[in-house]
Image: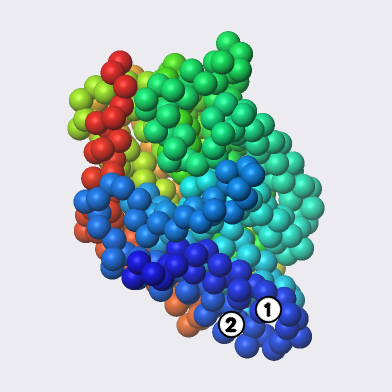
């Protein structure tokens, strides 16, 4: 096992599939779909192999691959896996093939669509596994290229504007991060995340940055923070997201919300948290209230939407803000015991995974509504869909109640742990954030009631139920919603030792 470059295979196998499809653009639709699914499923197969050999009680990196790359710059090809990375690899391995299976059939130019999708999948995996800034940033930026073309070429009427807005926002944020890490390299001579984190724990990193100039530690911190805030996004840097998610084709929307949005939260945990503990602790009280704003205003913005896809998009702002709420509450409080911080951090990681499942399922359901209604997706365009399509109504309803946080489904576990931890650290922020829970219940139940219940009206008249392939797309996600809702320790066990170690290393308040 140690001699097998397992992590490299996880990252580059989807890229191999993308290259193969790019070299065979005239391949038939059926063969294209089969090849794309084979290479996309490789992530789940190889991720399961990593899971089988993974020791969750060991908080150190596992399956490490480290090789010298650019000696003059001290750049290494460095991959490693811990509980956080493993959870996100498994999430990618689930969302990507499900989205490809459910959407490639209807895509124009299926070979190009699938090649871009596989390229996007491999880029995201590189972000989750690379531990040297140079290759990590390459993966980070490369993920924008296929996402841009998927939105622009297969998106809705406003796709061009949304695609450019998405790229400009995220590249703008990334420019600040690049400058920040250039300063880190000038101060330390390394891009290695592990070495930089060790220097930060010893108090050496801040001193080296201060030697460049008195305010450099704060400037570098702000550069990294801005890039990650745009990526998640943190309120008020969220304005690119509703248009991008709403105009993207269904498969791209599923991946954007299910996987790509988690890259920002991952960056907070992998970069900002270990490299800038003092600066994050100082800024956390302000950042905490921005996260609260994302929770509350994201939910109330969703409540005002009449476009179902924009409703789900704003719901993503709301749900990802729960993760940031947990991180900033812990950062602000410091080592206020280990139980509350560990609960909040475990909840944030579980929320990333569980939101990926439910949001991807909801975007697929909205895509099914849109395709059957001739492109319409307004909440007033449907009525009584449950009568004509009971299977679709049942599966979509489960996804909605998972997103709502119904006990027994996966969405409840992460939110419960987040509020359990945040109430113990900053009860006022937690109390205000419950307004977001209320609004979430209102807009999802409104969606459920107006689209699926009542008399059949509009596109709900003679609505066609899901076919076998569409059911097969949703069923794996729905099954996992029940499994992880009833047996959450399957996922929590992978990260609990890691977050307990993080909580024990927090600075004293």
Could you say where residue 44 lies in the image, as x and y percent from the top left? 42, 70
Q: Residue at x 45, y 48 (%)?
A: 444
Q: Quadrant of residue 421?
A: top left
Measured along the vertical axis of the image, is residue 389 above or below residue 139? below
Measured along the vertical axis of the image, is residue 346 above or below residue 360? above
Q: Residue furthest front?
A: 72
Q: Are marks 2 and 1 in contact (CB under 8 Å)?
A: yes
Q: CA distance from mark 2 to mark 1?
A: 8 Å
Q: Residues within 10 Å of mark 2 (few under 14, many from 20)?
A: some
Q: Nearer the viewer, residue 441 or 424?
A: 424
Badge 1 element? helix
Q: Quadrant of the C terminus?
A: top left
Query: Along the horizontal axis of the image, is 198 left or right of 375?
Result: left
Q: Earlier in the sequence, mark 2 or mark 1?
A: 1
Q: Nearer the viewer, residue 360 or 505?
A: 505
Task: Identify the residue position indicated by label 1 in the image.
Answer: 21
Q: Residue at x 28, y 66 (%)?
A: 53
Could you say where residue 314 lies in the image, as x and y percent from the top left? 55, 43
Measured along the vertical axis of the image, is residue 350 above or below residue 369? above
Q: Residue furthest top?
A: 214
Task: Identify the residue position indicated by label 2 in the image.
Answer: 35
Q: Is residue 13 visible?
A: yes
Q: Quadrant of residue 234?
A: top right
Could you say where residue 69 lies in the image, as x and y percent from the top left? 59, 54
Q: Is residue 408 visible?
A: no
């Amino acid at each position: 096992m140690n001699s097998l470059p397992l992590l490299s295979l996880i990252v580059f196998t989807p890229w191999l599939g993308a290259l193969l499809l790019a070299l065979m653009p005239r391949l038939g639709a059926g063969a294209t779909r089969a090849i794309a699914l084979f290479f996309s499923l490789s992530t789940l197969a190889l991720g399961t192999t990593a899971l089988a050999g993974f020791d969750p009680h060991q908080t150190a990196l596992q399956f490490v691959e480290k090789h010298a790359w650019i000696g003059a710059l001290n750049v290494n090809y460095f991959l490693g896996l811990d509980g956080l990375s493993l959870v996100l690899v498994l999430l990618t391995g689930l969302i990507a093939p499900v989205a490809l299976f459910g959407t490639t059939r209807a895509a124009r130019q299926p070979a190009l669509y699938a090649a871009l999708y596989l390229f996007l999948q491999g880029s995201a995996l590189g972000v989750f596994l690379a531990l040297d800034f140079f290759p990590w940033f390459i993966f980070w930026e490369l993920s924008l290229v296929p996402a841009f073309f998927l939105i622009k070429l297969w998106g809705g009427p406003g796709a061009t504007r949304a695609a450019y807005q998405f790229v400009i926002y995220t590249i703008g944020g990334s420019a600040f991060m690049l400058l920040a890490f250039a300063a880190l390299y000038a101060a330390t001579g390394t891009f290695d995340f592990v070495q930089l984190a060790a220097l930060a724990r010893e108090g050496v990193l801040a001193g080296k940055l201060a030697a460049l100039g008195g305010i450099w530690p704060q400037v570098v911190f702000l550069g990294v923070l801005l890039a990650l805030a745009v990526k998640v996004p943190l309120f008020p840097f969220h304005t690119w997201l509703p248009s991008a998610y709403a105009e993207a084709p269904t498969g791209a929307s599923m991946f954007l919300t299910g996987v790509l949005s988690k890259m920002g939260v991952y960056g907070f945990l992998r970069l900002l948290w270990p490299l800038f503990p003092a600066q994050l602790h100082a800024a956390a009280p302000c950042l905490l209230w921005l996260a609260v704003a994302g929770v509350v205003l994201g939910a109330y913005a969703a409540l005002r939407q009449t476009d179902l896809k924009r409703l789900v998009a704003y719901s993503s702002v709301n749900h990802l803000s729960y993760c940031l709420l947990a991180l900033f509450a812990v950062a602000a409080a410091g080592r206020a015991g280990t139980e509350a911080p560990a609960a909040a951090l475990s909840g944030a990681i579980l929320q990333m995974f569980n939101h990926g499942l439910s949001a991807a399922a909801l975007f697929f359901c909205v895509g099914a509504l849109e395709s059957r209604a001739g492109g319409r997706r307004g909440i007033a365009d449907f009525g009584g869909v449950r009568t004509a399509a009971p299977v679709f109504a049942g599966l979509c309803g489960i996804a909605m109640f998972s997103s709502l946080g119904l006990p027994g489904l996966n969405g409840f576990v992460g939110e419960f742990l987040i509020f359990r931890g945040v109430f113990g650290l900053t009860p006022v922020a937690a109390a205000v954030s419950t307004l977001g829970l209320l609004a979430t219940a209102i807009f999802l139940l409104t969606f459920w009631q107006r689209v699926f219940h009542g008399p059949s009206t509009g596109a709900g008249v003679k609505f066609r139920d899901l076919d076998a392939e569409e059911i097969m797309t949703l069923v794996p996600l729905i099954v996992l919603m029940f499994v992880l809702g009833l047996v959450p320790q399957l996922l929590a066990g992978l990260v609990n030792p890691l977050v307990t170690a993080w909580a024990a290393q927090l600075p004293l308040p």
